[in-house]
Amino acid sequence: MKKLTLVLVVVLAVALVSGCGSQIKTWRPDANPGYVDLTDKKFLVMPVKLKDCGDDALKMATALFAGFVAEFGENGIPLQPIQPALEGIGLGDLSWKLARGLTHAAFFHQTAQWDSCAGEDYSVIPNMIKTLVEKVGELLEKPELKFDYIVVLHVDSWAGEIPKTTNLKVIGGIYDPVKDEIAVAIEWEQTTSEDAMMAEMALLGPRVVEIMVGDNPNKK
């Protein structure tokens, strides 16, 4: 019996270090082919900000963003460096609003369009996006800047029921500012060991992008 208990504890510890959680939810419009083609496309990569992650929140956010933006290679346009400037024009919490808004519209209303509902007015997001589109070239000192999509990742965290663990809720997606619609939305929850949080942040970005992009049947 003691041996069985020890095995269960070890299995649980391994699972927590790896990050375990609820089923990954992915939503795409009906007309979507099931993947996002990154070829010759430019992506504005929204800043990442972590809440309730203690003294290492900034380091974790840096690790998360680094892995996230790296997946887009030269096609990614990182906005993390201009976060202070975004705050100065009232867009400091756009990443959080965008991630919340697109996952709400996708999973609750099953629509690629923005909407407002009880308690939270997601209709403010298009105006914030419009301001971003108008100002981003100036803020990046690239007046001729052009891009195809805006991509966002947000992670909420809270203490896990098991000691020394943290619950994470991962939300985000890819937004098409030209069509003013959601290309893909993702959402899931997981529990991670506190000791493995930094490593988990480094791995989370690539995992999210892989899920968002999907499987292109034409890719060789």
Image (cartoon, rainbow, N blue to C red):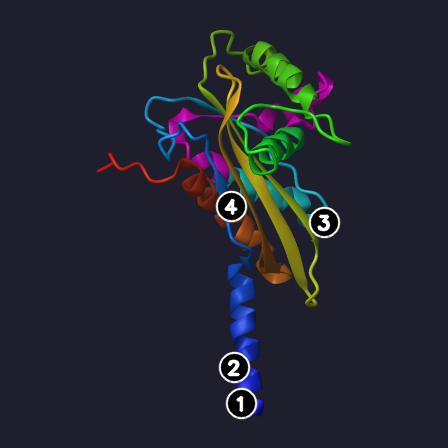
Q: State which quadrant residue 213 falls in.
A: top left
Q: Which residues are magenta?
A: 68-94
Marker disc for residue 3: 1
Q: Which residue carries the number 3 mark?
A: 55
Q: Secondary structure at mark 2?
A: helix
Picture residue at 56% right of the left edge, 64% below the top: 16
Q: Which residue carries the number 2 mark?
A: 7
Disc 2/disc 4 C-alpha distance (Å): 31 Å
Q: Where the N terminus falls, by quadrant?
A: bottom right
Tag 3 or tag 4, which sits nearer the N-term? 4
Q: Secondary structure at mark 1?
A: helix
The amino acid type of the residue labelled 3 equals Asp
The amino acid type of the residue labelled 2 equals Val
Is 176 located above or below residue 119 in the figure? above
Left or right of residue 124, residue 25 in this image: left
Mark 2, Cα crowd under 10 Å, few <14 / some 14-19 / many 20+, is few
